Image (cartoon, helix red, strand yellow):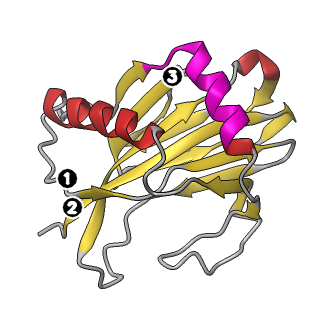
């Protein structure tokens, strides 16, 4: 079966990764939650620490430019009209996020998440485990290195496998638009 690309890869300079880790680590931490309103705490499914930047945080413009390029190059052609705040995540030993999608089609909102972008901010040599995978007919492990940015349709299942040692740092942002029809 032939289909459009399931992901689009880009990269950030290492200095940008360092700046993001320093700046975003200063924000208040919280247990990661799930669900439309972020009201569900389920460590068996998602266990990580997150922080949220202000909606107008400077890095959002970098991610928006990357997502627009991915949307055009991959021919997803989603109608993107907005975005959510940058989420900074730290995965320590035994922390993970099981298979999930980032879209909530039955929630009744006026918009749907269309494209997710994830940035790996530190070197995979600093942690074991923590692979980022996407599933479409098969499981694919994304070849992420420090500074990798990966954009993909928010309707695709994906996960972060458990970190076994060290810490994995990432920044994620969701881009939305009118409901899927």
31, 17: nearer the viewer: 17
Relative to residue 176, is residue 124 depicted above or below? above
* First along the sequence among labels 1 and 2: 1
- Residue wearing tag 1: 80
What kind of element bears circle 2?
A: strand
Q: Is residue 29 above or below residue 178?
A: above
Q: Position of residue 122 (x, y in %)?
A: 69, 24
Residue 1, given in percent of the width and then of the height, sits at 19, 34
Question: Where in the figure is residue 116, as x and y percent of width and height?
Answer: 39, 47
Measure the alpha-carbon separation of dots 1 and 2. Answer: 5 Å
95 or 25: nearer the viewer: 25
Relative to the observer, which residue lies in front, 158 or 121? 121
- State the extent of the magenta-drawn residues as a range: 11-23
Disc 3 and disc 1: Cα gap in Å? Answer: 22 Å
Q: Label 3: state its secondary structure.
A: strand
Q: Position of residue 47 (x, y in %)?
A: 75, 58
Read off the residue under disc 3.
148
User: Badge 3: how crowded within 10 Å, few (<14), some, or many (20+)?
Assistant: many
Crowd rating for badge 1 (residues with CA inside 10 Å; few <14, some 14–19, many 20+): some
- CB under 8 Å between discs 1 and 2: yes
Residue that sits furthest to the bottom in the current view = 108
Which numbered dot is residue 177? 2
Which residue sits at x=20%, y=57%?
A: 81
* Residue 159, visible in the rendered structure: yes
Residue 30 found in image quarter? bottom right
**Mark 2 crowd level (few <14, some 14–19, many ≥20, 10 Å Cα):** some
Q: Name the N-terminal-most of marks 3 and 2.
A: 3
Q: Is residue 91 left or right of residue 160?
A: right
């Amino acid at each position: 079966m032939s289909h459009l690309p399931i992901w689009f890869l880009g990269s950030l300079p290492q200095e940008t990764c360092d700046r993001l880790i320093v700046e975003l680590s200063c924000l208040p931490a919280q247990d990661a939650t799930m669900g439309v309103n972020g009201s569900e705490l389920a460590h068996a499914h998602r266990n990580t620490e997150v922080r949220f930047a202000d909606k107008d945080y400077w890095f959002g413009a970098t991610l928006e430019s990357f997502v627009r390029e991915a949307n055009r190059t991959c021919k997803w052609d989603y109608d993107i009209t907005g975005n959510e705040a940058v989420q900074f995540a730290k995965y320590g030993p035994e922390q993970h996020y099981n298979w999930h999608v980032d879209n909530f089609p039955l929630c009744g909102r006026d918009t749907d998440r269309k494209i997710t972008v994830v940035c790996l901010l530190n070197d995979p040599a600093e942690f074991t485990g923590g692979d980022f995978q996407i599933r479409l007919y098969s499981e694919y492990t994304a070849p992420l290195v420090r500074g990798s940015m990966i954009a993909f349709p928010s309707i695709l299942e994906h996960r972060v496998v458990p970190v076994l040692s060290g810490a994995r740092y990432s920044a994620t942002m969701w881009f939305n638009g009118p409901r899927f029809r």
